[in-house]
Image (cartoon, grey):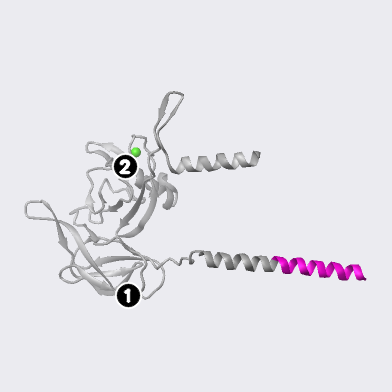
């Protein structure tokens, strides 16, 4: 009976954990925990250092919000050799919270970061579940000619080895320095860092086909422009075991029963033989 109540309590706690509700306890209102926020962090320094790494964000800097700073810190903590202490730095400056080190590079503050391919205002910008955060080190720290580029899709799931068409765009400026999106032509697609034969056309479009199985990081390089590598991750179909139907469950139960009965039969038979000796 004790075990029954313990199981019941455990089940209740599990249900309470997955369904947080505001409850009253001793006259106090206990608010539900905020929902988990997972974002996908990409870091580039000339090439792709980190490709859409999933980061479960926590308020690391204790400013009361989940921000780009928290996500980048945690991405380094998880993936950079030596953790965030070795590879990441941010500090308050005239322009607010700013990057001082990205992927181990300290270049006096020449970094860029985008959320869902839109330039962020600052490191303290709030983020939400499912956001894609792309941070990069400027390779041209004199003219800042590095153009942020991105594909029209972040991921291609269940990739079956067939052709996929991607469009490569870049963040540019018009004559009045207003931000505009431009097509990136003549860029060579890379697969896991290696150049392919696929090139973007005048409209930034390219149709690719990857023969190798598994997941791959699709990016691009350009001989014409200095571009921040875009990232699209394609992943192979996930094998899922067929669900257990009533029929298969019934068959499995019958087989198990027969095996068990067979075992009992052998034991009885052997026991009898031993007794006969
Ligand atoms: Ca924070």
The secondary structure making up most of the magenta span is helix
Which element type, helix, strand or loop, lies under badge 2? Answer: loop
Q: Nearer the viewer, residue 223 or 119?
A: 119
Q: Nearer the viewer, mark 2 or mark 1?
A: 1
Q: Residue at x 76, y 65 (%)?
A: 264
Left or right of 154 in this view: 21: right
Distance from mark 2 CB to nearest ligand 1 atom below 8 Å: yes
Instruction: Give the image quadrant in which the ligand numbered 1 is located.
Output: top left
Q: Quadrant of the C terminus?
A: bottom right
Asked where in the image residue 62 lies, by quadrant, the reply is top left
Residue hosting label 1: 162
Q: Earlier in the sequence, mark 2 or mark 1?
A: 2
Q: Nearer the viewer, residue 58 or 9?
A: 9
Residue 79 point in image, percent of width and height: 42, 53
Q: Nearer the viewer, residue 26 or 66?
A: 26
Res 220 label: none
Q: Which residues are magenta?
A: 260-277
Residue 256 point in image, percent of width and height: 65, 66
Residue hosting label 2: 67
Extreme residue toward the top, this view: 27
Asked where in the image residue 168 lies, by quadrant, the reply is bottom left
């Amino acid at each position: 009976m004790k075990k029954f109540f313990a199981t019941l309590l455990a089940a209740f706690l599990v249900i309470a954990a997955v369904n947080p509700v505001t409850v009253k306890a001793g006259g106090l209102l206990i608010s539900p925990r905020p929902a988990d926020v997972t974002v996908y962090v990409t870091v580039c320094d000339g090439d792709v250092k980190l490709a859409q790494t999933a980061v479960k964000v926590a308020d690391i800097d204790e400013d009361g919000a989940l921000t780009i700073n928290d996500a980048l810190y945690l991405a380094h903590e998880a993936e950079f050799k030596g953790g965030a202490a070795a590879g990441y730095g941010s500090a308050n400056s005239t322009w607010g919270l700013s990057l001082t080190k990205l992927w181990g590079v300290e270049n006096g503050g020449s970094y860029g970061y985008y959320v869902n391919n839109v330039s962020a205002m600052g490191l303290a910008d709030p983020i939400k579940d499912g956001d894609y955060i792309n941070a990069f080190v400027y390779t041209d720290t004199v003219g800042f000619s590095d153009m942020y580029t991105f594909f029209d899709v972040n991921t291609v799931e269940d990739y079956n080895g067939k052709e996929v068409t991607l469009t490569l765009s870049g963040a540019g400026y018009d004559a009045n320095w207003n931000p505009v999106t431009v097509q990136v032509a003549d860029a060579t697609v890379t697969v896991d860092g290696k150049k392919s034969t696929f090139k973007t056309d005048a409209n930034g479009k390219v149709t690719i086909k990857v023969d190798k199985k598994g997941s791959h990081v699709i990016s691009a390089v350009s001989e014409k422009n200095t571009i921040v590598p875009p990232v699209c991750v394609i992943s192979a179909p996930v094998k899922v075991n067929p669900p257990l139907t009533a029929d298969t469950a019934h068959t499995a139960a019958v087989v198990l029963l027969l095996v068990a009965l067979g075992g009992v039969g052998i034991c009885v038979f052997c026991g009898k033989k031993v007794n006969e000796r």
